[in-house]
Image (tube, rainbow, N blue to C red):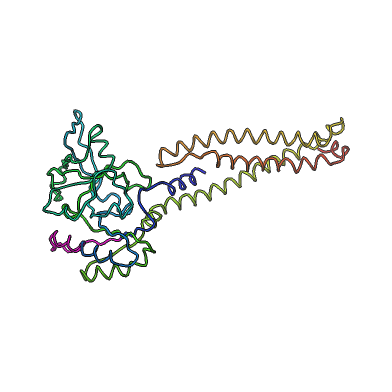
Amino acid sequence: GMLMTSLLSLQRAETGFNTHNVLALNVPILSFERPPEQVAILYKEAIRRISQLPGVERVAVGTIVPWRDAGTFGPGFQFSAEGYAKADGEEDPRARFRTVSPGFFAALGVPIIAGRDFSEADRADAEPVVIISESVAKRMFPTQEALNRRMMWTDPVTQFVGIRTAPRRIVGIAADVDDENVVPGPAMSVYHPFEQEIGGGRMFVHASTDPYTLVPSITRIIRELSPDQPVEQAATLADIRAEVLAPDRLNALVFGGFAGVALMIAVVGVAGVLAFSVSARTREFGVRLAIGSAPRHLLTRVLREGAVIAGAGIVVGAIGGLILARVVGFYIPDVEIPGLVPVTAAAAVLVAAAVLASLMPAARASRIDVIQALRAE
């Protein structure tokens, strides 16, 4: 129950993305001889031509494919912001570095909460601008307006990877989306126009039809622009998420199968023990019948005793199971403690097994001849 509940919770978790109609493709630029200007031209022309395909609604470029490229930039880079004062000894907060093209948020269904999206005017020679996630705005500007303030990267690593540390004006605030974890949490992210910072390599196509039917046409367009350009790992975000969840699904199925076998063994064991116990009381039943006890009273008493024994075992087992589930939760992240439904279902199966195990021999004993019962060893 714990494993199945955890799996269902993972599958139902809101991602913040439009996962069904968005196709993600790896389109990495492998030629280091191309200057950034030519790379930007290639992507922009690819976006323009792919947008004209039938069934295509939006096309955008980004740096990572959600979940599949998790950890590409490590834990993120340290940054600061205009007017932010950190406590003594506190390090600058970290945020995920992302570069995206105009229309990225609309293509993936991520709302812009305040401000604007990037536009074609956000070129390399224009004012440096960024869009921040809602978590960044709340962390850095809890009582102030974040728009039009400035942030800057302060992480020493940035000087080695070519990221500029100059201040950048905040022009928009996007809703939080966790593109690294299957179970989403607050995500501090900073997005840059892909012409102003290093990035690209991932293309997103929002389609009104089956996205997979567009793969040959998209590949043909990109190869026409650059014959040696690879186009790889085309998949919808829904399928990518399902692939990431595959190990969890396998674990749930395997361990769920073992749990089912264990439950069946428990049912057989409970039924066998109670059946043996009731059968061994044949002489007792004969005495009770001889002194005037009605068969139905005998049957009711035996069923009640079996239910009490099973109920006591279930209470002890449920408490032990919940304790074990909490212990497991320390070692396996995102484990869901079983709710009322799986616990009640398991208890009902065991109670039914106990009642049936008591019913059959008790009914047989209540119908036997008193003399034969008194003679039983």
Number of callouts:
0
Residue interval drawn in magenta: 25-43
Instruction: State left or right for residue 341 relative to residue 169.
Output: right
Residue pictured at 29% horizontal, 44% vertical: 113
Residue pictured at 71% horizontal, 33% vertical: 305
Residue placed most toward the observer, 123 or 75: 123
- The C terminus: image quadrant: top right
Residue placed most toward the observer, 321 or 16: 16
- The spot of residue 311 in percent (x, y) is 64, 34
Instruction: State left or right for residue 253 relative to residue 239.
Output: right
Q: Is residue 284 above or below residue 58?
A: above
Residue placed most toward the observer, 32 or 365: 32
Q: Is residue 33 above or below residue 166?
A: below
The picture quadrant where one finds residue 154 is: top left
The picture quadrant where one finds residue 58 is: bottom left
Residue pictured at 87% horizontal, 32% vertical: 290
- The spot of residue 269 in percent (x, y) is 64, 43
Residue placed most toward the observer, 85 or 307: 85
The picture quadrant where one finds residue 83 is: top left
Residue pictured at 22% horizontal, 57% vertical: 200
Is 41 in the magenta? yes
Is 27 in the magenta? yes
